[in-house]
Image (spheres, grey):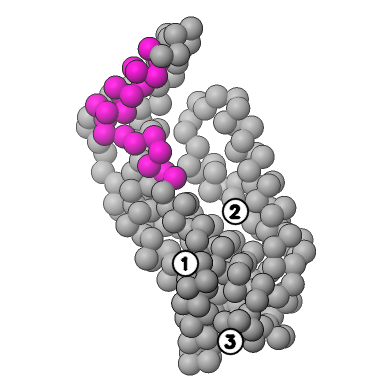
Amino acid sequence: MINALSGMMASVLNYFQSVLGLGWGMAIILLTIVVKVVLFPFSISQIRSMEGMKKIQPQIKEIQEKYKKNPEEQQRRMMEVYKENKVNPLGGCLPLLLQLPFLWALFGLLNNPEKFNIDFTNAFFLTMDLAKSKYLVLGIISGLTSFLQQKMTTVANTDPSQSSFMYFMPIFMGYITYTLKAGVGLYWVASTIIGILQQWLIAKFFIRENPQVES
């Protein structure tokens, strides 16, 4: 399946590069936009789920405090709140999971471009060779954009462990991006930036206040 997806992405990249005359870097960015457009309906669902979680957070915190010595009752009460307000606590995970095959496919494509009839010889974007890794600037941008996205999606008044995760994850993503080939890193950074813009647009134009949620 991943090989088939790599082949499809190679065809799209070749089209952008040979027919539209784009450089490989711009071709990867345009491919990222295409993937984001395809996954846009799932992104709407994700943002709605996150906004719903923000609204019910006071209720969740109250239940966690009240039943902290009774985990089973705590879980039952929390599930009742989710059900009453039509919120899926795992709803925000689906778009990320759907993006992973595209990321793996591009990784496989850049690791073996000859297999997919892609010539990445002298494939540069700005000063970066897209077939090589360890570009510090790409890692830093990845970390900063990941932090901004985490900041936008984090529910207010989260517990300390989640707050620590908000700082750890961008550092981790920055390091991973640094170690990956620049083409994959560029895709990830572009995907994160587009995701931030998508999140703002969805919150502004696609989400209405849910009167069912009570504080």
Which range is magenta? Answer: 73-93
Q: Nearer the viewer, mark 2 or mark 1?
A: 1
Q: Residue drawn at (50%, 37%), measured in percent from left and top? A: 154
Q: Which residue is mark 2?
A: 145
Q: Which of the numbered marks, if any, corresponds to residue 117?
A: 3
Whole-percent x, y for residue 90 in the image: 40, 38
Q: Residue drawn at (73%, 59%), measured in percent from left and top? A: 178
**Which quadrant would the C terminus be assigned to in this image?**
top left
Q: CA distance from mark 1 to mark 3?
A: 18 Å
Amino acid type, residue under disc 1 in the picture: Met
Q: Which residue is mark 1?
A: 1
Q: For the view shown, which residue lies furthest in the left direction?
A: 211
Q: Which of the numbered marks, if any, corresponds to residue 20?
A: none
Amino acid type, residue under disc 2 in the picture: Thr
Counting residues from the N terminus, which is met first, the one under dot 1 or under dot 3?
Answer: 1
Secondary element at tag 3: loop
How many residues crowd mark 1 within 10 Å: few (<14), some (14–19), many (20+)? few
Residue 186 in view here: no
| Left or right for 36, reference 79 | right
Secondary element at tag 2: helix
Residue 92 placement: quadrant: top left
Secondary element at tag 1: loop
